[in-house]
Amino acid sequence: MEDTFQLTAAILAFAAVIGFVATRLRQPLIVAFIAVGIAVGPAALGWVQDAEPLELLAEIGIAVLLFLVGLKLDLHLIRTTGPVALVTGLGQVAFTSIVGFGIALALGMDPTAALYVAVALTFSSTIIIVKLLSDKREIEELHGRIALGFLIVQDIVVVLVMIALSVFGADTGQSLSGEIITLLLSATGFLVAFVVMVKWVLPWILHRVAGSQELLLVFAVAWAVAVAAVSEWLGFSTEVGAFLAGFALASTPFREAIGASLTPLRDFLLLFFFIELGAGLDFSTIGGQIPAAILLSAFVLIGNPVIVLVIMGIMGYRKRVGFLAGLTVAQISEFSLIFVALGLQLGHIGDETVGLVTLVGVVTIGLSTYLILYSHPIYDRLEPLLSVFERSEPTKGDDSDEATHPDVIVYGYGRFGRNLAKGLHDAGQRVLVVDWDPVAATTDQPEDGLDIVFGDAEDPRYAESLPLHHVSGVVSTIPSLQTSRSIVSALRSHGYTGPLALTAHDDVGAELLGRLDAQLVLQPFSDATQHGVEQLLGAFDRDGLSER
């Protein structure tokens, strides 16, 4: 097909059909979409002879994905998981490179090809792992944060390896030390400009665009893609730039609203990444590589998780955290394919080496997807055998590592909501306030001692970002019947079954709200605020949910 629009339409229709079949068979969509890419690529139907028509959408999807990951982090998480991420990331890269090099030599490869294969096996797919952990809502759990940390370490190693490969493999006119110095100077300038934007420019812009949900969404995507583009221009990957763009907004009260709005866009655009990945796989040189690919795939699927388990066990982490984090490196990355393709272009390796790494990529990406999706049942079966990876008295990875969650969520920060939230706070409850007013979200919380986030109560996706499984109750102080219905629908669809209080201005409204499965309906015009606080505390206490 020559027409790009028709080609895209045909690929989307085909992906929809295969995706439907996969969901009916309870198979991961990632595997299904990679299979779609293989089917429409040169290896099968031949619709896509090169992946260029899909590349732009795929790159934007990657930028949005890593932007959302950075959006969920803050300095506290970096301080707590930074050391283990650095040690585990570097340890896994060193172990996989050394052992993989030995296996490749034992398979009869020459030293250069063996070195390329060994290095290719060290890279894990940040994009696939983050997508799977996000779908399982585990990206903010301890093992998810640690996994994200050592994936970032791997990305930095990728940049350095690619620089070294370019210098030694081609006449760039600059030494390796010169390349590294240039890279460091670029990084310094980039970070200085980045800090200036974060400290003085972004708060001013966000305060003015947050009044429109559409404008906030456009600004977030523009910011993510722009920082990713600058990062790539300076010699870093787009992933690093997009991640930093999200991290810049992680400490703002707007992050949850932005995250909720971008999630559907992320899922749609990543479809093109997985299809592009499948379409770019070259099976023409596989030939007799299957036995070697099986051996190397087994090494990646088993050896990488084991080394992570060992390192984290030595550092005092519990076996469960180490096992769940370790499974995330049980595959090779799309960068592995780019890496060996560059080696082929430079004349360092032949087609057979590229075919071998391609086959290992297909096997490990497919199988590791299942390992991550079913990580908890797998752990339950293997748990008795994993004690060898845990200290007799582990010091990390228990419930104390998890963040403190609110007791009550209050929608609305108007006059009634403000007094109600303050009353609950004064009564010893940890209160999280959700409001669509950017002024309240950015200026009131320091003096009130409340945690206030910017969010749209009528957005059904926003409830996913709230800690609903940890709170004692949810209160809406917004008297709109339509808004109340949206809140109830969103909460129930995301599994919240706890106490719920709604607000009405009159008896008719109170009667209608009573049909929405609310335990309590507040009427601020007829009840004093303090009386409402007492009612709430009593209602939550009766359900036995306010005691900690």
Image (cartoon, helix red, strand yellow):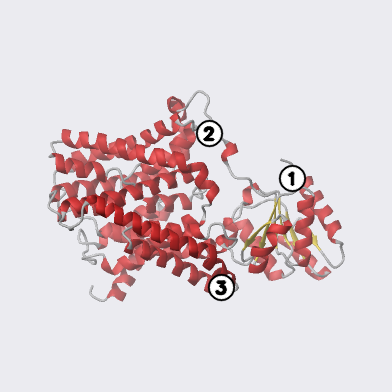
Q: Position of residue 500 (x, y in %)?
A: 72, 56
For marks 1 and 2, give the CA distance.
Answer: 28 Å
Local crowd at mark 1 within 10 Å, few (<14), some, or many (≥20)? some
Figure check: 265 above or below 30 = below
For marks 2 and 3, give the CA distance.
Answer: 42 Å
Figure check: 458 above or below 38 = below
> Residue at horizontal 70%, vertical 62%?
444
Q: Amino acid at mark 1?
A: Ser
Residue 166 found in image quarter? bottom left
Local crowd at mark 2 within 10 Å, few (<14), some, or many (≥20)? some
Q: Is residue 100 left or right of residue 288?
A: right
Choose between 20 and 543: the one closer to the eye: 543
Q: Secondary structure at mark 1?
A: loop
- Residue 546 numbered tag: 1
> Residue at horizontal 22%, vertical 63%?
45
Q: Secondary structure at mark 3?
A: helix
Q: Position of residue 260 (x, y in %)?
A: 54, 62
> Residue at horizontal 29%, vertical 52%?
180
Choose between 153 and 457: the one closer to the eye: 153
Q: Is residue 314 left or right of residue 214?
A: left
Q: Amino acid at mark 2?
A: Lys
Q: Secondary structure at mark 2?
A: loop
Q: Which label's residue is closer to the chain start, 1 or 2?
A: 2
Q: Which label's residue is closer to the chain start, 1 or 3?
A: 3
Residue 227 in sight in this render: yes
Q: Which residue is mark 3?
A: 209
For marks 1 and 3, give the CA distance.
Answer: 37 Å
Local crowd at mark 3 within 10 Å, few (<14), some, or many (≥20)? some
